[in-house]
Image: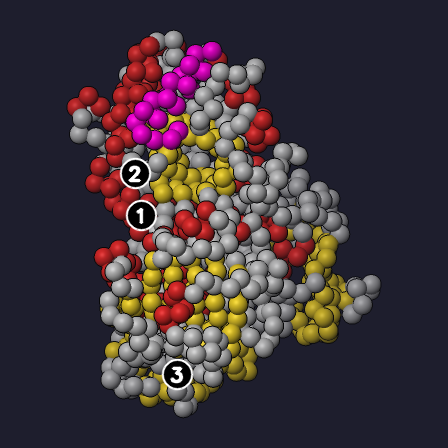
């Protein structure tokens, strides 16, 4: 909790803050975080604020703070105000009433002003907002309700990242997106995703200001070596009561009208538009199963037979049935990868585009015209294209032909979960953050920044592996790590002004935001040696696991009283030296940290007395080996409230290699650089050239005592290797030789006699595969867990 004498806007009244045009002071792209130390730095949010004018001091939530809706806008803003109140309570533990009355000191004000102008032109007018913070009030103003909603996301993120979760820095933000389309596509045709999951993803998209969810509603697997298409998975995911289409919806999962209406309601509440896609004439096995006569080769195909007039008529009837469900101005009719009957394909393309317009919607399609046509003369030009592959229809060809388009490039933005192609383990977040922008395409196909035909970008998940056993939450684990990066680059095209590792740290802290019911964050792996995450926990009362689940919007609460305890079983002994507590408003005044090897015999390693506020508290102590760690409260800040913690984190002795200079004998490609092994991100990796004698080494900066190394190997692991140390990076001494390790991914935890060194190296001797050596992490520590006394 921060208390400063504020200086910003002088004596300007709240009414002026609401009505006076904002002064554009500094660009987020031009001014890095930190800025002028005499004023407040730009607060961290994702995506980063486009412009920020910092003041001094801070706004503090008061006991009487309210959410005030601007006069004459109560009806339009009532739902947002009610929701924001619930979200602030979830994020901060504080309950704010919603009021239509005149703003008072300590209030948060929401206001729609259609005349409000700002940078960004149409983008500001549609989705921009201003966030004005004085010592007395916070005001979010925007030309639209969507802009107000985005402003509330920034407000919540700032509070979530604040130490006490109760203050915002005085200053003024002006924020808007540079791109109209900031999207994500999910293939539900090949694999059904539950309605709860879809609704949660709409909320997650809103948290990061992504604004279009394209649902690929039908598709099928690949025939491969199967003798018949009848053995191939196929899915269509909309279910109607119309008897003429009875049986079209997939038995293993489909969305009825009530489900779809709930999607549309959730999307509207989160600033997202759903782009429905019904894909034909390829990828159409679900339609052919329903009407075998419509398929090529007497139904032994996933391509529709366009020589039959009834084929196009049937597809029009499908759109006739379901387009009335869709609230989006755009509807996607697929039209990709149809490799036969090119003349009839053109006719189908044009007829479907015209039919969708006749239904009151704008058509979208996958860009396939370079393959499907010797030239594109005669193709309907009033269609928005997803530019997904340079060969099928790259951005330069699309521009030449006059189409508007969306960057959905397969080489950069596709995920096929757990496949050996198309980023089967997730997108390359570091590359996307450091080098990519929505106008960037591979193969020399990039367009100019701000090209008027480029609407934005969209990442995509394709569930090609229809027989694999992964779950929808497994897919989330692949998608979430780069959601924040994509949001950042699609919002402004620029980085946030900090290195990727720091940006990823902010994304981790933000998690998935409040209000989700099924999806939780997977970005909880600590870069600082946390060993308590997700471990078994118990308490004197309350939900103990909430303090160790990695989510910043859940908490353990003991209930009333001064005496309470919370403990975690780390699963095995660790050498620990620190406990981090994040107190909710029900903080502890006096408390102890105890440790134990067996859960029965305890010793006190740290004590805090006289704490007076919520927020973070770090208790460091001499390294000790323990399996069980306990917090014991002896006096609560307010006895009638008891204790509540957002999180309790137990940390190992520090990883000496974290963010230290790291070099290697080689890297397979520049993006698989050696520093990836020491960046604290388990999803990045270093990979060497395909030779046995490769090495990777870390400069610890000064001589350190080391006795433990942890190597997290990717599949390309080391069979035989040495751990070596040096004082000068020239003369090396082997402290441990490792031999005959198994093939595949694994973690090697290595301990050796303590030694003092500045440099530590993994020297490869022999690989387990034809590839090189590849490490997700290379950790170095000064202390290993000590064995139990005899």
Judging by the rendered image, the residue that carries numbered circle 2 is 327
Q: Distance between the residues labelled 1 and 3?
A: 38 Å
Query: Under tag 1, what secondary structure?
Result: helix
Q: Which of marks 1 and 3 is nearer the N terminus?
A: 1
| Callout 1 touching callout 2 (CB < 8 Å) | yes
Q: In which quarter of the image is residue 358?
A: top left
Q: In which quarter of the image is residue 69?
A: bottom left
Q: Distance between the residues labelled 3 and 2?
A: 47 Å
Q: Which of 649 and 452 is in front in this view?
A: 452
| Residue 344 in magenta stretch | yes
Residue 367 at x, y percent in the picture: 50, 27
Residue 256 at x, y percent in the picture: 22, 36
Residue 546 at x, y percent in the picture: 34, 67
Mark yes or no: residue 341 visible: yes
Q: Which of marks 1 and 2 is nearer the N terminus?
A: 1
Q: Image check: 354 left or right of 625? A: left
Q: Which residue does the image show at 34% across and 16% down from the upper left?
A: 312
Residue 787 at x, y percent in the picture: 53, 74
The relative height of residue 345 versus residue 201 in the rendered view (above or below) is above
Q: Quadrant of residue 445?
A: top right
- Number of labelled discs? 3
| Residue 405 in magenta stretch | no
Please provide the residue range marked out in magenta.
343-363
Judging by the rendered image, the residue that carries numbered circle 1 is 268
Query: Under tag 3, what secondary structure?
Result: loop
> Does the magenta stretch mainly form a helix, a strand or a loop?
helix
Q: Which of 96 and 24 is in front in this view?
A: 24
| Residue at far bottom of view | 610
């Amino acid at each position: 909790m921060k208390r400063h004498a504020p200086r910003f806007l002088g004596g300007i009244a709240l009414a002026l803050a609401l009505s006076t045009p904002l002064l554009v002071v500094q660009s987020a792209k031009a001014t890095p975080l930190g800025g002028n130390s005499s004023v407040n730095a730009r607060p961290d949010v994702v995506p980063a604020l486009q412009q920020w004018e910092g003041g001094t001091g801070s706004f503090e939530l008061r006991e009487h703070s309210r959410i005030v809706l601007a006069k004459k806008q109560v009806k339009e803003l009532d739902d947002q105000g009610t929701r924001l109140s619930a979200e602030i309570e979830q994020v901060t533990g504080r309950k704010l009433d919603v009021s239509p009355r005149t703003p008072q000191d300590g209030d948060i004000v929401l206001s729609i002003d259609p005349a409000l102008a700002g940078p960004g032109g149409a983008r500001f007018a549609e989705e921009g907002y201003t966030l004005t913070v004085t010592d007395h009030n916070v005001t979010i103003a925007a030309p639209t309700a969507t802009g107000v909603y985005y402003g509330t996301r920034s407000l919540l993120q700032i509070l979530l990242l604040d130490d006490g979760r109760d203050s915002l820095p005085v200053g003024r933000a002006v924020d808007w997106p540079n791109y109209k389309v900031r999207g994500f596509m999910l293939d539900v045709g090949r694999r059904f995703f539950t309605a709860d999951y879809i609704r949660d993803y709409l909320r997650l998209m809103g948290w990061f200001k992504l604004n279009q969810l394209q649902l690929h509603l039908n598709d099928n697997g690949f025939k491969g070596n199967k003798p018949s298409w009848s053995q191939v998975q196929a899915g269509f995911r909309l279910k109607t009561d119309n008897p003429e289409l009875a049986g079209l919806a997939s038995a293993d999962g489909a969305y009825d009208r009530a489900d779809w209406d709930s999607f549309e309601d959730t999307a509207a509440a989160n600033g997202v538009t759903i782009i429905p896609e019904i894909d034909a004439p390829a990828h159409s096995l679900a339609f052919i199963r329903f009407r075998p006569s419509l398929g090529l080769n007497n139904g032994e195909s996933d391509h529709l037979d366009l020589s039959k007039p009834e084929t196009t008529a049937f597809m029009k009837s499908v759109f006739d049935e379901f387009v009335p469900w869709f609230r989006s101005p755009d509807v996607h009719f697929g039209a990709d990868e149809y490799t036969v009957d090119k003349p009839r394909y053109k006719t189908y393309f044009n007829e479907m585009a015209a039919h969708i317009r006749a239904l009151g919607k704008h058509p979208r399609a996958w860009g396939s015209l370079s393959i499907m046509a010797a030239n594109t003369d005669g193709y309907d030009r009033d269609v928005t294209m997803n530019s997904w592959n340079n060969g099928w229809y790259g951005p330069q060809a699309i521009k030449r032909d006059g189409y508007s388009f969306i960057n959905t490039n397969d080489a950069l933005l596709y995920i096929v979960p757990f496949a050996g192609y198309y980023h089967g383990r997730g997108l390359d977040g570091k590359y996307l953050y450091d080098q990519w922008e929505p106008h960037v395409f591979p193969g020399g196909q990039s367009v100019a920044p701000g090209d008027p035909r480029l609407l934005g970008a969209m990442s995509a998940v394709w569930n090609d592996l229809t027989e694999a056993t992964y779950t929808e939450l497994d897919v989330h684990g692949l998608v979430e790590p780069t959601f924040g990066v994509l949001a950042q680059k699609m919002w402004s095209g620029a980085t946030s002004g900090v290195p990727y590792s720091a940006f990823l740290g902010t994304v981790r802290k933000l998690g998935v935001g409040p209000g989700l019911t099924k999806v939780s964050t997977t970005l909880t792996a600590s870069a600082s040696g946390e060993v308590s995450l997700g471990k078994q926990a118990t308490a004197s009362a309350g939900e103990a696991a909430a303090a160790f689940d990695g989510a910043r919007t859940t908490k353990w609460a003991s209930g009333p009283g001064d005496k309470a305890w919370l403990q975690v079983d780390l699963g095995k002994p660790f050498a620990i030296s620190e406990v981090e507590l994040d107190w909710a408003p029900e903080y502890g005044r006096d408390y102890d940290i105890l440790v134990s090897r067996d859960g029965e015999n305890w010793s006190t390693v740290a004590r805090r007395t006289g704490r007076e506020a919520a927020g973070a508290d770090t208790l460091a102590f001499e390294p000790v080996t323990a399996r069980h760690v306990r917090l014991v409260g002896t006096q609560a800040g307010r006895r009638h409230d008891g204790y509540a913690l957002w999180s309790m984190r137990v940390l190992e002795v520090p990883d000496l290699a974290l963010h230290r200079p790291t070099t290697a004998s080689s890297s397979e490609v520049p993006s698989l650089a050696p520093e990836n092994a020491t960046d604290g991100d388990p999803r990045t990796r270093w990979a060497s050239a395909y030779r046995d004698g490769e090495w990777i080494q870390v400069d610890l900066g000064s001589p350190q005592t080391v006795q433990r190394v942890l190597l997290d190997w990717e599949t390309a692991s080391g069979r035989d290797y040495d751990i070596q140390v040096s004082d000068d990076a020239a003369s090396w001494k082997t402290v441990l030789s490792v031999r005959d390790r198994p093939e595949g991914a694994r973690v090697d935890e290595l301990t050796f006699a303590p030694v003092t060194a500045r440099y530590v190296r993994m020297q490869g001797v022999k690989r387990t595969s034809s590839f090189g050596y590849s490490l997700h992490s290379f950790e170095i520590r000064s202390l290993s867990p000590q064995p139990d006394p005899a």
